[in-house]
Amino acid sequence: MRINLINVGWLRDPMQHERYSRWVKASPATGPFEHFMMVVVQGLGRLDCQLIQEDSRYCSLPEAQQQTIAESIKTSDRFTLSYLWVLGAYELVRTMDQRVRDKTSLISASLPQRLSELKRAFKRVRIPLAKMEPAKAHKDTDSPIAFPALHSEQGISWQLTRTDFVSRRELSDALLGFLEDLRSHDPHFIENATKAT
């Protein structure tokens, strides 16, 4: 058994439907960077919602059912998809950060620092996932391997030190929040929202 990427049954869950709507509404904010980013953001948002729903489903199972072969395979699939989600989302963040460095007027003056912090948060997990070495900023503290872990509330996570874990959900919440703030600072959207009221 594995996660069915074509199934949209997760949209019947009101919380996931609302979250996906947030991704879709925030996605046009990437237009100043590259118009095609909107499609990438919506795809990452869709996968985010599916992974959250599957993590939640798994955590609600009795322990005996969690330990079945079928659930083990589903968990392995979620770890792989979460790994790929982090790599894809990092590239999105890295590209936006590079474009802002090249042309600071792309976004509101209050957001470049936040974008850099978001990139650093992703990089801390992405480097050990992709290169099997710690991120340079954490070379003296972090493991070269981001060890997979399951958090009872946050779902798929990675252990970077004896006490530091980073969940995919934390990263997705941070990215979604940034994109929503980016959209709220975009003069085009502010002007249209003002006209609608």
Image (cartoon, grey):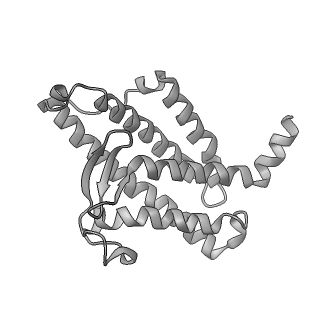
In the picture provided, is 28 more to the left or to the right than 76? right
Q: Position of residue 85 (x, y in %)?
A: 38, 50
Question: Is residue 37 at least partly visible in the picture?
Answer: yes
Q: Which quarter shows the C terminus? A: top right
Q: Residue at x 61, y 75 (%)?
A: 101
Q: Position of residue 64 (x, y in %)?
A: 15, 27
Q: How many marks?
A: 0
Q: Position of residue 48 (x, y in %)?
A: 43, 41
- Up/down of 116 relative to 158, above or below: below
Q: Position of residue 46 (x, y in %)?
A: 46, 38
Q: Quadrant of residue 59?
A: top left
Q: Nearer the viewer, residue 156 or 95?
A: 156
Q: Residue at x 67, y 59 (%)?
A: 32
Q: Nearer the viewer, residue 165 or 47?
A: 165
Question: Is residue 5 at least partly visible in the picture?
Answer: no
In the picture provided, is 116 more to the left or to the right than 193? left
Q: Which quarter shows the N terminus? A: top left
Q: Residue at x 40, y 76 (%)?
A: 137
Q: Residue at x 36, y 62 (%)?
A: 125
- Up/down of 186 relative to 1, above or below: below
Q: Quadrant of residue 5?
A: top left
Residue at the farthest front position:
163
In the picture provided, is 41 more to the left or to the right than 190? left
